[in-house]
């Protein structure tokens, strides 16, 4: 996924399903310079982690 799409997902008024390595995540913020995003696994919302945005996958409806 590219950083522009990550920004669109963050700013979307509807929930867009995204996974990282097969795990559903909530994207909290993106750093276009380092091409990373801060995400929270949906099943462990207190476990914040920084990941490479290329590993994020937008899932279908």
Image (spheres, rainbow, N blue to C red):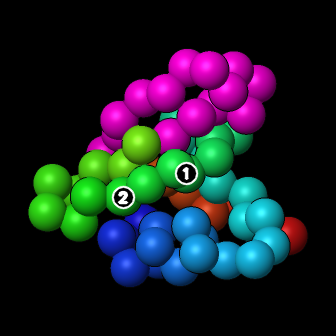
Question: Which residue sits at x=50%, y=40%?
Answer: 39
53 within the magenta span: yes
**Residue 23 lies in what quarter of the image?**
top right
- Depth check: 16 or 12 in front? 12
Dot 1 and dot 2 residues touching (CB under 8 Å): yes
Q: Secondary structure at mark 1?
A: strand
Decide if residue 44 is in sight here. Answer: yes
Question: Which residue sits at x=49%, y=27%?
Answer: 48
**Residue 2 lies in what quarter of the image?**
bottom left
Q: Which residue is mark 1?
A: 27
**Residue 38 lies in what quarter of the image?**
top left
Q: In the displayed structure, would residue 35 be above or below residue 60?
A: above
Q: Is residue 44 left or right of residue 21?
A: right
Please state the horizontal and vertical placement of residue 56, each as a whole percent of the image: 48, 52
Please state the horizontal and vertical placement of residue 24, each as a whole percent of the image: 69, 40
Start-end of magenta stretch: 39-54
41 within the magenta span: yes
Question: Which residue sits at x=37%, y=49%?
Answer: 37
Q: Which residue is mark 2?
A: 30
Q: Sort mark 1 into few (<14), some (14-19) or many (20+) by Cα contacts within 10 Å.
A: many
Please state the horizontal and vertical placement of residue 7, each as a whole percent of the image: 46, 73
* Cα separation between marks 1 and 2: 8 Å
């Amino acid at each position: 996924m590219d950083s522009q799409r990550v920004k669109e997902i963050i700013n979307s008024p509807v929930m867009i399903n995204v996974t990282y390595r097969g795990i559903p995540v909530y994207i909290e913020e993106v750093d276009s310079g380092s091409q990373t995003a801060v995400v929270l696994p949906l099943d462990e919302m207190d476990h914040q982690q920084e990941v490479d945005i290329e590993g994020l996958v937008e899932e279908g409806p």
